[in-house]
């Protein structure tokens, strides 16, 4: 739901991002529970849905209610910072809130209340500080004008204060914008530079030394140069300090780990004390510099990690390994920095001993191997979890997963990383909270030690069967993780860095984009990570970089003297794609990668990239949640099928309403990572109980729910939330014997003397046992059957029935419906619109649908092919469609579509014969599309042409759900000697026919003017009291002039016609005039009220109005002077009661202005 589509929501939550303040949660839950609010719409407030489900709120976004609240409640989160306020999304929200506040203050019957929450102070604006949640709800329902005025005044004052601050910021931007020095040269640093440059607070990002990408990025980004202008190639501490002082930097951001370990932060603190530095001190960087230190730290503070031992002697390490069970696999790590390659993964005891010797005796990683860590091998998916840290707390970013191995299928040597994606699907909401808590604890304990940690803490996590465990810590952003995490960040990165440096991270709301994924594919030089070539010319950068939703980050690149970008390292580029899901992001990334080449002097392409990035995530197992009340016998075969791989699924949660239910023990047997929970229903309504159960399932990342012996009736809220994602088993062949339970069902089968029974897996809906059937299993009913024996037979099939249903859900084949396209919906639409189309029949066509093409018989329409010219016209409705979308009124735009085409045909002297339409949408709404086509059919009837066909295109990846676009195609005919314009000359008279309104041109400006006036399409129409709303007036369909003009064409009275569309009178009338003739407009009708309002709001002068809008004239007729009266009579006979005498044609010089206004617009 968008911010303009809130009319159906009882409560709107706007702009809270990733926060969900307790005060707001309490208020919303109470409004739902006690006052009949039942529809909640979070807009850019993604945390509320999950937070509201949890105890003590237990509230679904959509709650069944028989009452309707008297007032809509809008709760707006005041942007916590200026940069957040200046973002596009916040500006749209602020504009929306302002307009609603103004409307409410001007409306005698205000049915809306707006509360503004100040997250910086944790309170509502304009509310007495001692008010309780009960008081707040009472205030909302009161008709206290003073209370409403206080709320509106407080909100507007707060927004005004932000506007004032923004004006100050913009006025002094050059003086107040900051300079950032960014240390590093990789893809990580390019991504950091791009993100920092997007801040309005930043004037320059100087990369030291940077790479070819940062050199060519332009804008605020540049590579560092020395005082004499030569490029700086070193980034040692002394060079950093000298550069910071010389450019008067405000912040230093350190990308790689080595400068941090070398103490650059400490040195800057001494040499440049007024400069913020984002990165940990040397003591903080010890978390990466020494794996031995980190393991000891984790153990000391009880942060989960693998069992380990640190060694400085190879022989002692080998003796320790020999003392272990030979089957216990170990990991061997060089404790120091080893460029991400100092971790060895032996598989046997002999390989473990060899790894120790390689690190400690052979010095494969140099001094980094002086100390060696031997730790137990952990199993499970890995996740890269990066957290912003300010020395006191931490905020976790979306988890990423990367690919270390050089080759597909995770084969080949370890690398710095060959690709990554985020958010990682394996990190559920509950795991995210658990990992963030570990990071916060780490920061707190570092502070207690006297070494506060500021910067990014990169926690490499293993999601083991016993829960998340720390593999390692890094003291900087990951590469390539940075290239997928930062594009998801919505909050200003520079603002986050400032908050970290100042110890104020808790004062800002770190937001990430909703429903967006990112994937990056690293393009490396062939041979990497071993010996690889350099100097290859990189091709395809412009093509890849220009693709939508793609950013190419440079790592090992340089620009030569001929301005050619060349390879200068092993990992050369990281190509990041974005999308609404991971599959879309991967598709965007790989499409761009295909454009890129690394060409050596022989013409060979020496580029290498993996082709399977995120393959596991896109083919991840279906995450199953189970709800049960009894033994859960049917769960056993499902558990076995998940374990042996018979189904591509895993059980991640088991929930019961009974504390002693044996099914809980089955859940616990699956291990500690499976959420197993008893949820008490005491004191809760059905919906509240189901909400808490749903919170448990969602927290575990459940995608599909199985009801296995669950003895509770589910609420409407639950069934709607899990619609299509929850199945139950019933012990009969539904729809027979629906509604019964256990033995009574089997007895009913026997009593009915049925020869067969069985079980049914069905989707769960509000109607008990009434959901769509998924799977049925059949058993024979013996003549001697008892209810107990039949139950035993049927129950034995329930597990396999569930397995079949899960396999069906996990099927590998993808249908058109799976891609978001409904063939059935398309067929339903055709049947629905056939009557409307048949109503447009005329001689020459039968206006039937369903064939491959529409047919038209010219002879039947009275045309001889030898002297007939065919005319074609095509057009659309433009941005008028946005008004239809927002008001959900669709029939009139179909008339517009026809009018824009047939009015153009008639101008050429032709008769419209038939029409075809093109309707494109992201998701086909049959009723909506049918309404549009009914409008098209009505337009065709008005024009006298047949609607003989069309195309309905459902394209989920092209259009957002709820959006559609239209195109129309009309064909007409005219006798060869009657084509217009014809014999137009000086002395001809101009007659004007009135428009019905704005028609279908100029709506981009119209929509802007409505916004400028702080109105919306549901507002009362300010230019016509009888028109209803602004939307109603603007959707007045375009007038069709065919039937009134045809009689004049048949009598050959017209020398020309001009359809007044985009460009207005001044641009369209000349199209029908010869070059030596001009129109003298001596009279123009008074501006209709809608155009008068547009003129007033826009400030446009007459000239601009006349070249933008039709200004009340929709068609201009050019006739000879001697037939003016007869022409008017024919027009009146055709129903045109208003005809304007506009002027005459006169001679002019070729090339001069062809429309001269001799009157003003009144």
Image: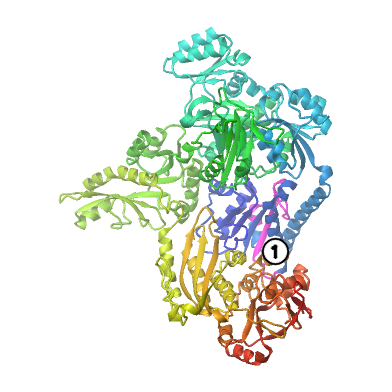
Indicate left or right for 1095 with 512 as reference.
Answer: right
Question: Which residue occupies the extreme front position in the image?
Answer: 866
Residue 623 drawn in magenta: no
Q: Position of residue 183 (x, y in %)?
A: 72, 30
1082 in relation to 948, above or below: below
Q: What residue is shown with label 1?
A: 1008
Visible residue check, residue 77: no
The secondary structure type at the circle numbered 1 is helix
Q: Position of residue 1062 (x, y in %)?
A: 66, 69
Indicate left or right for 799 with 1151 as reference.
Answer: left
**What colour scheme governs how the chains and residues are painted in the rendered image of this protein?**
rainbow
Indicate left or right for 747 with 1081 as reference.
Answer: left
Q: Kindly indicate the quadrant of the structure image that contains residue 1065.
A: bottom right
Q: Position of residue 414 (x, y in %)?
A: 53, 25
Which of 973 and 754 lies nearest the eye of the viewer?
A: 973
Q: Quadrant of the C terminus?
A: bottom right
102 in relation to 23, above or below: below
Q: Kindly indicate the quadrant of the structure image that contains residue 204.
A: top right
Question: Which residue occupies the extreme top position in the image?
Answer: 315
Residue 124 drawn in magenta: yes
Q: Quadrant of the N terminus?
A: bottom right
Which residue lies at the image location 55% right of the left edge and 22% below the top edge? 530
Which of 534 and 318 lies nearest the eye of the viewer?
A: 534
Q: Which residues are magenta?
A: 107-136
Which of 778 and 59 lies nearest the eye of the viewer?
A: 778
Visible residue check, residue 770: yes
């Amino acid at each position: 739901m968008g911010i303009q589509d809130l009319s159906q929501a009882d409560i709107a939550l706007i702009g809270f991002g990733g926060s969900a303040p307790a005060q707001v949660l309490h208020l919303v839950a109470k409004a739902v529970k006690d006052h009949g609010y039942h529809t909640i719409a979070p807009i850019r407030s993604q945390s509320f849905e999950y937070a509201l489900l949890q105890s003590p709120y237990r509230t679904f976004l959509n709650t069944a209610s028989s009452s309707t609240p008297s007032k809509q409640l809008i709760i707006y989160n005041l942007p916590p910072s200026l940069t957040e306020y200046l973002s596009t999304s916040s500006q749209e929200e602020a504009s929306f809130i302002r307009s609603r506040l103004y409307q409410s203050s001007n409306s005698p019957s205000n049915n809306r209340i707006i509360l503004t929450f100040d997250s910086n102070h944790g309170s509502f604006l304009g509310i007495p500080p001692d008010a309780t949640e009960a008081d707040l709800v009472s205030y909302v329902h009161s008709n206290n004008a003073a209370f409403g005025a206080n709320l509106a005044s407080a909100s507007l004052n707060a927004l005004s204060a932000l506007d004032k601050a923004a004006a100050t910021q913009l006025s002094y931007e050059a003086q107040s914008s900051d300079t950032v020095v960014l240390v590093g040269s990789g893809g990580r640093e390019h991504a950091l530079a791009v993100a920092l440059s997007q801040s309005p607070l930043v004037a320059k990002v100087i990369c030291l030394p940077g790479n070819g990408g940062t050199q060519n990025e332009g804008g605020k980004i540049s590579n560092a140069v020395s005082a004499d202008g030569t490029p700086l190639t070193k980034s040692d501490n002394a060079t950093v300090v000298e550069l910071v002082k010389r450019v008067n930097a405000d912040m230093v951001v350190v990308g790689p780990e080595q400068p941090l370990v070398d103490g650059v932060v400490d040195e800057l603190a001494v040499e440049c004390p007024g400069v913020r530095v984002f990165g940990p001190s040397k003591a903080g960087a010890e978390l990466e510099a020494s794996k031995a230190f980190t393991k000891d730290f984790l153990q000391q503070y009880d942060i989960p990690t693998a069992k380990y031992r640190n060694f400085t002697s190879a022989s002692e390490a080998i003796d320790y390994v020999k003392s272990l069970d030979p089957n216990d696999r170990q990991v061997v790590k060089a404790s120091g920095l080893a460029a991400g390659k100092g971790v060895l993964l032996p598989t046997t005891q002999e390989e473990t001993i060899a790894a120790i010797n390689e690190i400690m005796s052979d010095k494969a990683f140099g001094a980094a191997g002086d100390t060696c860590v031997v730790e137990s091998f952990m199993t499970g998916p890995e996740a890269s979890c990066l957290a912003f840290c300010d020395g006191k707390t931490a905020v976790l970013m979306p988890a990423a997963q990367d690919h270390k191995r050089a080759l597909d299928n995770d084969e080949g040597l370890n690398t710095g990383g060959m690709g990554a994606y985020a958010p990682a699907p394996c990190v559920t909401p509950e795991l995210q909270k658990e990992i963030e808590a570990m990071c916060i604890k780490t920061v707190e304990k570092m502070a207690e030690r006297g070494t506060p940690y500021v910067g990014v803490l990169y926690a490499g996590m293993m999601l083991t069967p016993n829960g998340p465990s720390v593999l390692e810590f890094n003291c900087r952003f990951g590469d390539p993780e940075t290239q997928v995490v930062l594009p998801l960040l919505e909050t200003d990165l520079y603002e986050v860095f400032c908050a970290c440096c100042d110890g104020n991270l808790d004062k800002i709301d770190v937001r990430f984009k909703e429903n967006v994924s990112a994937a990056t594919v690293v393009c490396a030089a062939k041979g990497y990570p071993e010996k690889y070539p350099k100097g290859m010319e990189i091709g395809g950068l412009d093509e890849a970089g220009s693709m939508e939703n793609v950013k190419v980050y440079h790592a090992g690149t340089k620009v030569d003297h001929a301005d050619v970008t060349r390879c200068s390292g092993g990992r050369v580029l990281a190509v990041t794609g974005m999308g609404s899901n991971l599959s879309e992001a991967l598709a965007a990334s790989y499409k761009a990668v295909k454009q890129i080449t690394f060409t050596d002097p022989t013409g060979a392409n020496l580029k290498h990239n993996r082709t399977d990035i995120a393959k596991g995530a896109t083919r991840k197992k279906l995450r199953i949640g189970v709800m049960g009340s009894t033994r859960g016998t049917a769960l056993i075969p499902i558990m076995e099928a998940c374990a042996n791989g018979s189904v591509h699924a895993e059980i991640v949660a088991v929930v019961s309403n009974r504390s002693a239910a044996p099914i809980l023990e089955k859940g616990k047997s699956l291990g500690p990572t499976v959420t197993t929970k008893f949820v008490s229903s005491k004191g809760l309504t059905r919906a509240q109980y189901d909400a808490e159960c749903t919170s448990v399932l969602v927290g575990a990342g459940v995608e599909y729910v199985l009801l296995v012996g669950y003895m509770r009736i589910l609420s409407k809220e639950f069934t709607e939330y899990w619609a299509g994602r929850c199945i139950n088993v019933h012990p009969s062949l539904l729809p027979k014997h629906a509604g019964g339970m256990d033995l009574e069902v089997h007895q009913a089968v026997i009593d009915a003397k049925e020869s067969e029974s069985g079980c049914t897996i069905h989707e769960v809906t509000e109607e008990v046992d009434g959901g769509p059937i998924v799977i049925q299993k059949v058993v024979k009913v013996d003549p001697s059957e008892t209810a107990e024996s039949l139950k035993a037979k049927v129950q034995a099939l329930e597990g396999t029935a569930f397995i079949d249903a899960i396999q069906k859900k996990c099927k590998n084949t993808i249908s058109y419906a799976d891609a978001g396209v409904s063939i059935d919906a398309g067929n339903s639409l055709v049947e629905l619109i056939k009557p409307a189309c048949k109503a447009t029949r005329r001689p020459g066509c039968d206006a039937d649908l369903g064939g491959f093409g529409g047919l038209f018989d010219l002879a039947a329409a009275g045309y001889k092919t030898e002297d007939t010219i065919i005319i074609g016209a095509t057009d659309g409705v433009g941005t008028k469609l946005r008004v239809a979308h927002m008001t959900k009124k669709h029939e009139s735009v179909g008339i517009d579509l026809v009018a824009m085409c047939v009015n153009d045909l008639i101008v050429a002297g032709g008769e419209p014969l038939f029409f075809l339409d093109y309707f494109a949408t992201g998701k086909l709404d049959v009723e909506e599309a049918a309404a549009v086509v009914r409008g098209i059919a009505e337009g065709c009837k008005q024009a006298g042409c047949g609607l003989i066909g069309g195309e309905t295109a459902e394209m989920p990846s092209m259009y957002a759900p709820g959006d559609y676009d239209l195109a129309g195609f009309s064909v007409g005919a005219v006798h060869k000697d009657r084509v217009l314009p014809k014999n137009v000359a000086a002395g001809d008279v101009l007659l004007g026919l009135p428009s019905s309104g704005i028609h279908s041109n100029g709506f981009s400006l119209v929509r802007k003017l409505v916004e400028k006036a702080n109105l919306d399409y549901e507002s009362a129409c300010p230019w016509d009291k009888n028109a209803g709303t602004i939307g109603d007036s603007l959707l007045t369909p375009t007038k069709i002039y065919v039937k009134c003009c045809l009689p004049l064409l048949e009598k050959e009275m017209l020398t020309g016609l001009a359809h007044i569309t985009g460009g207005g009178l001044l641009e369209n009338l000349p199209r029908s005039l010869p070059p030596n003739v001009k129109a003298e407009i001596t009279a123009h009708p008074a501006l209709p009220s809608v155009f008068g309002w547009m003129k007033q709001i826009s400030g446009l002068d007459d000239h601009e109005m006349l070249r933008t809008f039709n200004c009340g004239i929709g068609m201009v007729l050019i006739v000879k002077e001697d037939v003016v009266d007869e022409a008017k009579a024919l027009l009146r006979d055709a129903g045109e009661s208003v005809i304007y005498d506009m002027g005459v044609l006169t001679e002019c010089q070729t090339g001069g202005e062809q429309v001269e206004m001799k009157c003003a617009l009144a």
